[in-house]
Amino acid sequence: MKYTSDERIDTYRKWQQSQKIPINTGFLIEDVRKIEVAPWDHKGGLGAFINLDGTGETNDAYVCEIPPGKQLKVQKHLYEEMVFILDGHGATSVWQKSGKKHTFEWHPGSLFAVPLNCSYQLFNGQGNAPVRYFAVTNAPFMMNVFHNLDFIFDNDFAFTDRFLPEDDEYFSGKGQLWGRKMSVNFVPNTRDFQLYDWKERGAGGKHVNFDLAGNVMGAHISEFPVGRYKKAHRHGPGAHVTILSGQGYSLLWPEHGEMVRANWKPGSVVVPPNQWFHQHFNSGAEPARYLALRWNSWRYRFAVINSDTPVDVSLKEGGAQIEYEDEDRKIHEIFESALAKVGAPCHMGSMVPWCAQKESGHSHK
């Protein structure tokens, strides 16, 4: 290998720039359903990249649009990808070189993972409207590890431990459940998927954690009631928090640093930066639910990027969570102010010390 200069090479960035579609950066996407897309020859549709600050350049996201009645080009790549359907109805076919083709249908709210290095193709099943989907991948990590695009896009190795073509139920939506943890490859509808109590995270919230297609990347869905907010916690980079329902905001801050507020609604995406504390607040009139597409499935350990420090254990006990009694009082004051603007009541009750004192008629000192 010969070099002509001392330029530092970023294989992912060079490939990305060659795609000639919009690249969205910053802290928050207000609505991924509305961002500008442009013709994307690589996919055979329209698209835009999303590289938010909180990824630390370890993973990425993109939006792709399939015109009415059309299909994308066949794809195959040596990086993991999780797909969330934003709008439209259609189908995906998945196959390996020496195996039968699996085809499954999807609609708004569906989530699935593409098995690593399988061939696949997405189809718009509507003749009168486009399909739009949001995907999170670990392409930046994989491209820069191998820095060889032929190896990424033209590799014939079959990961039969992740996907057996003979498995007729692979994309059926059936999965195995262990408490709040589930191994599954297709979630028909994230918006009404059954969740399970997670008392340790506070706010009366519910949760389910997915292992998808044997990936080291994973996903989870969380929901919390009206007038509530979750406890603050921190973790590694790259968790794409995608709002499914409700209205609210997140507060994010580095340790000993200034808070940043990100207001959200359905379609918003925010990525907390590496080891920044963050806290999610429901300031609307209906339960708030979000889907997080991120590093670290619960099944496969990948601590190089995301630590194993438990997010539902107090900092005082070696975890990554700030308990309600230890949080800055202004956090609750900001929440009550937000609720007052929409005429919604606070339901934190005895969970937050000064909230309980206020309800009982005692002042906090």
Image: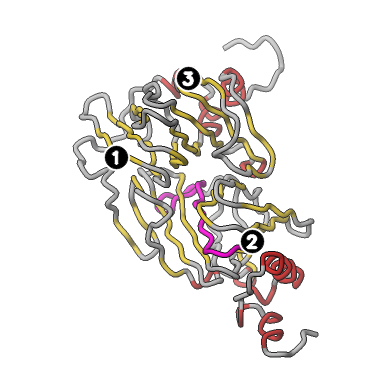
Q: Amino acid at mark 3?
A: His
* Mark with earlier residue (1, 2): 1
- Camera-nearest label, 1 or 2: 2
Q: Relative to residue 258, is residue 100 depicted above or below?
A: above
Residue 101 location (% of width, % of height): 24, 30
Q: Which residue is mark 3?
A: 42
Secondary structure at numbered mark 3: loop
Which residue is farthest bottom? Answer: 361
* Between 263 and 292, the one nearer to me in the picture: 263
Q: Which residue is mark 1?
A: 161
Q: Amino acid at mark 1?
A: Asp
Please provide the residue range marked out in magenta. Answer: 284-302
Cα–Cα gap, marks 3 and 2: 38 Å
Mark linked to residue 46? none
Secondary structure at numbered mark 1: loop
* Mark with earlier residue (3, 2): 3
